Image: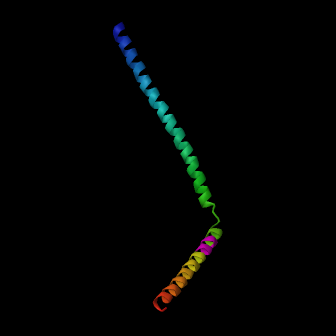
Amino acid sequence: NLTILQQDLSSISDAQSVIGGRLSRVKQESQYLTQLNQTLTATVSSIDGANMAEVASQLNLEEQAYQAALQTGAQVLSVSLLNYLHP
């Protein structure tokens, strides 16, 4: 009977070791997920808190600058092509 009890005690000790390792990994993952949640919350807050009027205004200015650059490029190309075709 003593041998059986010692084997059972050994089995319980092994099970506790396995459970302890798993618990440690679960705690680490929980800490990682908590930190990730905080990071995502901060990111969403920074995106959500953007001044949409300012963003739209900036986009409009950049679109106008882009269109002006395209028009200037088209004028330069058309003049240079005509000069090449009609010397």
Magenta segment, which residues? 57-62
Residue at the farthest bottom position:
86
Where is residue 77 drawn, in percent x and y?
51, 83
The picture quadrant where one finds residue 10 is top left
For the image, the number of numbered tags is 0
> Looking at the rendering, which quadrant does residue 59 occupy?
bottom right
| Residue 1: x %, y % from top left | 34, 8
Q: Nearer the viewer, residue 76 or 35?
A: 76
Query: Which image quadrant is residue 69 in?
Result: bottom right
Most extreme residue toward the front is 87
Between 62 and 25, the residue placed more toward the observer is: 62
The residue that appears at 60% across and 60% down in the rendered structure is 48
Instruction: From the viewer's perspective, tell me whether residue 19 is left or right of residue 47.
Output: left
Residue 13 drawn above or below residue 65: above
Residue 40: x percent and y percent?
Answer: 56, 51
Q: Is residue 61 magenta?
A: yes
Residue at 51% of width from left, 39% of height from top?
30
x 47%, y 33%: residue: 25
Would residue 46 be counted in the magenta stretch? no
Residue 74: image location, x then y, percent:
52, 83
Residue 29 or residue 16, whichever sits in front:
29
Front-most of residues 42 and 70: 70
Q: Is residue 7 above or below residue 62?
A: above
Is 78 located above or below residue 57 in the figure?
A: below
* Dominant SS in magenta: helix
Task: Residue at 60% x, 75% y: name it.
Answer: 60
- The colour mode here is rainbow
Q: Is residue 13 above or below residue 56?
A: above
